Image (cartoon, rainbow, N blue to C red):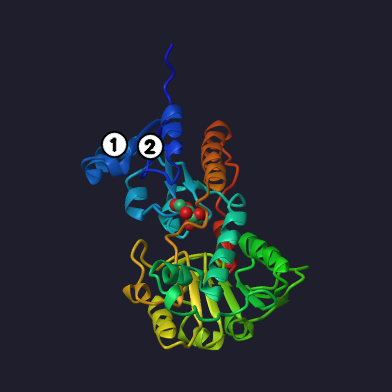
């Protein structure tokens, strides 16, 4: 006897291809981005879905949530939830699962990859060798990373993992959050400006969203100063990208390593022309191991919610509101 599988609205293709097939095997999946007319599809069929699967990058707009009057649960691929429309979801009473914890290591690794690259000019030196310039002259000398001061903006799970990596590089760590973390071995600085002033390397691991929008502005960049480097593995929205371009162009900071941008996949065009910034296409969690673990949690959250009414890991909306500057 055929049993009917729960219907799931998937917003688009997932960031780990096997997950599309795994979802389609377990559920009756309809992919919104593949509908000829997504608005019409929502208007005609939106009332049939209780479950949605999306990702931190695809998000979930109020327009879609409002078209799903029976929505009960959203399973999102990612630790960030700034692109999920909280207001409409809460109005609907929909619960939201996400994937914290499993990507901390790879995101922290990426923060260090960007930090070392920005300091030592690795990407730039690769371009230098490929252009055949080595036979004509020496590559310039760069900045030491080990033993320097590392400022962490957002001492959540990812920030703490970055701090652990820093110990291996003999770096001194300080951090800024809205509130000090009880029992933290690291120095707390009460403002982002003070942290920037103190830091040789300022790493952003704070959650995105309205609470942190453009907090890293021209003033903070000037406080970081001409010897300082910025690394962002959190959200592009935390940085005023136009101010960053100006600071990099005028050498008001030494350099930057960026995995995230304000308007992905369109980094500010000014960044593309600069050699003192390393650009990555939002790949911090993009390893086989971590994306698999994220996919497993997306599946587990959905299956467990359907079976018991409780997800494994639920978005902490109110905690996020209280501590907008704490990393997710
Ligand atoms: C993912 C991310 O690349 O987890 C997050 O919040 O931004 C990244 O790990 C993204 O979720 C893929 O959509």
Regarding residue 77, the answer to whether it shows in the image is yes
Q: Nearer the viewer, residue 114 or 105?
A: 114
The residue beneath circle 1 is: 45
Callout 1 touching callout 2 (CB < 8 Å) = yes
> Residue at position x 43%, y 30% from top?
27
Seen from this angle, which residue lies furthest top?
Answer: 1
How many numbered marks appear?
Answer: 2
Q: Examine the image and state in which quarter residue 267 appears.
A: bottom left
Q: Examine the image and state in which quarter residue 262 appears.
A: bottom left
Horizontal relation, residue 220 to residue 84: left or right: right
Q: Nearer the viewer, residue 325 or 276?
A: 276
Q: CA distance from mark 1 to mark 2?
A: 8 Å
* Residue 312 locus on image (x, y percent): 60, 42
* Residue 185 locus on image (x, y percent): 77, 70
* Residue 198 locus on image (x, y percent): 64, 84
Regarding residue 210, the answer to whether it shows in the image is no
> Residue at position x 34%, y 35% from top?
30
Callout 2: few (<14), some (14-19), or many (20+) C-alpha neighbours within 10 Å?
A: many
The residue beneath circle 2 is: 49
> Residue at position x 47%, y 64% from top?
259
Seen from this angle, which residue lies furthest front?
Answer: 135
Q: Nearer the viewer, residue 252 or 99?
A: 252
Q: Is mark 2 within 8 Å of ligand 1?
A: no
* Residue 159 locus on image (x, y percent): 63, 65
- Name the quarter where the N terminus is drawn: top left
> Residue at position x 63%, y 63% from top?
156
Q: Nearer the viewer, residue 112 or 142?
A: 142
Callout 1: few (<14), some (14-19), or many (20+) C-alpha neighbours within 10 Å?
A: few
Q: Secondary structure at mark 1?
A: helix
């Amino acid at each position: 006897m055929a049993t009917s599988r729960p219907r799931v609205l998937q917003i688009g293709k997932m960031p780990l291809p096997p997950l599309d097939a795994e979802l389609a095997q377990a559920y009756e999946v309809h992919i919104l981005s593949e509908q000829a007319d997504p608005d019409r599809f929502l208007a005609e069929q939106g009332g049939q879905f209780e479950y949605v699967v999306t990702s931190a990058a695809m998000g979930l707009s109020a327009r879609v949530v409002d078209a799903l009057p029976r929505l009960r649960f959203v399973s999102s691929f990612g630790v960030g939830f700034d692109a999920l429309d909280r207001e409409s979801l809460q109005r609907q009473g929909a619960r939201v699962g996400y994937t914290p914890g499993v990507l901390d290591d790879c995101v922290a690794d990426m923060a260090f990859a960007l930090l070392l690259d920005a300091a030592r000019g690795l990407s730039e030196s690769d371009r230098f060798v490929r252009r055949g310039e080595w036979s004509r002259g020496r590559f310039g000398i760069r900045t030491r990373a080990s033993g320097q001061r590392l400022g962490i903006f957002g001492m959540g799970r990812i920030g703490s993992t970055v701090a652990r990596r820093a110990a291996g590089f003999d770096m001194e760590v300080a951090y800024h959050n809205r509130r000090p973390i009880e029992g933290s071995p690291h120095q707390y600085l009460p403002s982002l400006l003070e942290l920037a002033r103190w830091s040789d390397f300022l790493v952003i691991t704070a959650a995105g969203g309205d609470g942190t929008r453009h907090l890293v502005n021209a003033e903070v960049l000037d406080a970081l100063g001409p010897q300082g480097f910025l690394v962002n593995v959190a959200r592009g929205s935390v940085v005023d990208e136009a101010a960053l371009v100006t600071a990099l162009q005028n050498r008001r900071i030494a350099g930057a390593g960026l995995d995230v941008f304000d308007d992905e996949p369109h980094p500010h065009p000014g960044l593309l022309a600069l050699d003192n910034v390393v650009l990555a296409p939002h790949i911090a969690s993009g390893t086989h191991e971590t994306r698999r673990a994220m996919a497993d949690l997306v599946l587990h959250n959905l299956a467990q919610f359907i079976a018991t009414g409780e997800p494994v890991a639920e978005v902490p909306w109110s905690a996020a509101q209280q501590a907008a500057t704490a990393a997710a």
